[in-house]
Image (cartoon, coloured by chain):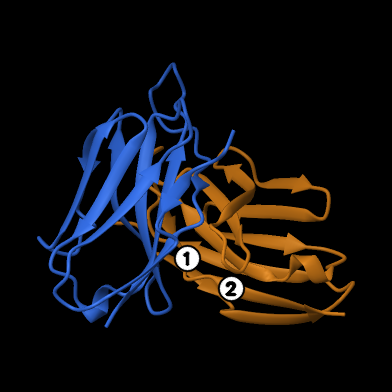
Chain colours: A blue, B orange
């Protein structure tokens, strides 16, 4: 399996521009997570999906952030308009489900991240 | 919500020595505690995990201990090697779906 695939790996943009980050989870994984990593705050959970449905978006910083999962093999995280404080590495991760309980098995498989710099 | 604290933030050890990283958590409902290793330019990768029904788990040179009463858990790496140099994150999960990460420990193994 190719693992979780994220694009772009690096993005440099100017303040006010729209940014779209993309993620392809591992085939068969039911959960998809978006994390943001900064030196100051570490790994922060932004939002997660179960079977393409957003379950908890309480970590999304503000209305400028939105995430979608139109199908089981694709998700986007959009920032509009972007600001310098959004500069970070954004990770997508996916996980399997215990069929009996429907809960994540626990192991998160991370992509290699998208490094965003907003000037 | 859950609050996970991790110490130290940086750790340097001589090759062959042991390294210990400690984490505390606040939510007594947490029942799953994974450890992730992140190499430069990569995403975190699970190296070992422990569930609340056991106190210790070992996998070759890596071990994790859990004290539910005190709400703390630790990662132990023995016989460290240069390839162990990375950032290590602990996490706690109060449910099966949400993971709260510590702030990371940058481990340097000096040859």
Quadrant, the C terminus of chain A: bottom left
Q: Please, which chain is the residue tagged with disc 2 on?
A: B
Relative horizontal placement of residue B28, taking residue B68 as reference (left or right): left
Quadrant, the N terminus of chain A: top right
Q: Is residue B55 above or below residue A96?
A: below
Q: What residue did someone put label 2 on?
A: B105
Counting from the top left corner in percent of width and height, residue B18 is at 81, 70
| Secondary structure type for disc 1 | loop
> Which residue appears farthest toward the left when viewing the image?
A63
- Residue occupying the point 73% across, 82% down: B12
Counting from the top left corner in percent of width and height, residue A36 is at 36, 63
Q: Quadrant of residue B11?
A: bottom right
| Secondary structure type for disc 2 | strand
Q: Please, which chain is the residue tagged with disc 1 on?
A: B
Relative horizontal placement of residue B79, taking residue A59 as reference (left or right): right
Q: What residue did someone put label 1 on?
A: B102
The span from disc 2 to disc 1 (Cα, nearest Å) is 9 Å
> Which residue appears farthest toward the top when viewing the image?
A100
Q: Dot 1: few (<14), some (14–19), or many (≥20) neighbours within 10 Å? A: many
- Residue occupying the point 43% across, 78% down: A39
- Residue occupying the point 57% across, 38% down: A2
> Relative to the observer, which residue lies in front, B79 or A113?
A113
Counting from the top left corner in percent of width and height, residue B52 is at 54, 42
> Relative to the observer, which residue lies in front, A73 or A103?
A73
Q: Are marks 2 and 1 on the same chain?
A: yes
Q: Is residue A62 above or below residue B62?
A: below
> Relative to the observer, which residue lies in front, B75 or B37?
B37
Counting from the top left corner in percent of width and height, residue B55 is at 65, 46
User: Mark 1 and mark 2 in contact (Cβ < 8 Å)?
Assistant: yes
Q: Dot 2: few (<14), some (14–19), or many (≥20) neighbours within 10 Å? A: many
């Amino acid at each position: 399996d190719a693992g979780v695939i994220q694009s772009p790996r690096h993005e440099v943009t100017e303040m006010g521009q729209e940014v779209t980050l993309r993620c392809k989870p591992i085939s068969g994984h039911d959960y998809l997570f978006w994390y943001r990593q900064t030196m100051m705050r570490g790994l922060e959970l932004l939002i997660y999906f179960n079977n393409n449905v957003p379950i908890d978006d309480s970590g999304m910083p503000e209305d400028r952030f939105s995430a979608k999962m139109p199908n089981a093999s694709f998700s986007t995280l959009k920032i509009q308009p972007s600001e310098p404080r959004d500069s970070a590495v954004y990770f997508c991760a996916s996980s399997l489900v215990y069929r009996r309980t429907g809960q994540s098995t626990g192991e998160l498989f991370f992509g290699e991240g998208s490094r965003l710099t907003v000037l | 919500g859950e609050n996970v604290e991790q110490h130290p933030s940086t750790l340097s050890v001589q090759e062959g020595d042991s390294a210990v990283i400690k984490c505390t958590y606040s939510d007594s409902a947490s029942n799953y505690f994974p450890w992730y290793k992140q190499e430069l330019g990569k995403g975190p990768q699970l190296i070992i995990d422990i569930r609340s029904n056991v106190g210790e788990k070992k996998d070759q040179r890596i071990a994790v201990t859990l004290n539910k009463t005190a709400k703390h858990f630790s990662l132990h790496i023995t016989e460290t090697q240069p390839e162990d140099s990375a950032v290590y994150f602990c996490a706690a999960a109060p449910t099966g779906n949400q993971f709260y990460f510590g702030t990371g420990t940058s481990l340097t193994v000096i040859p």
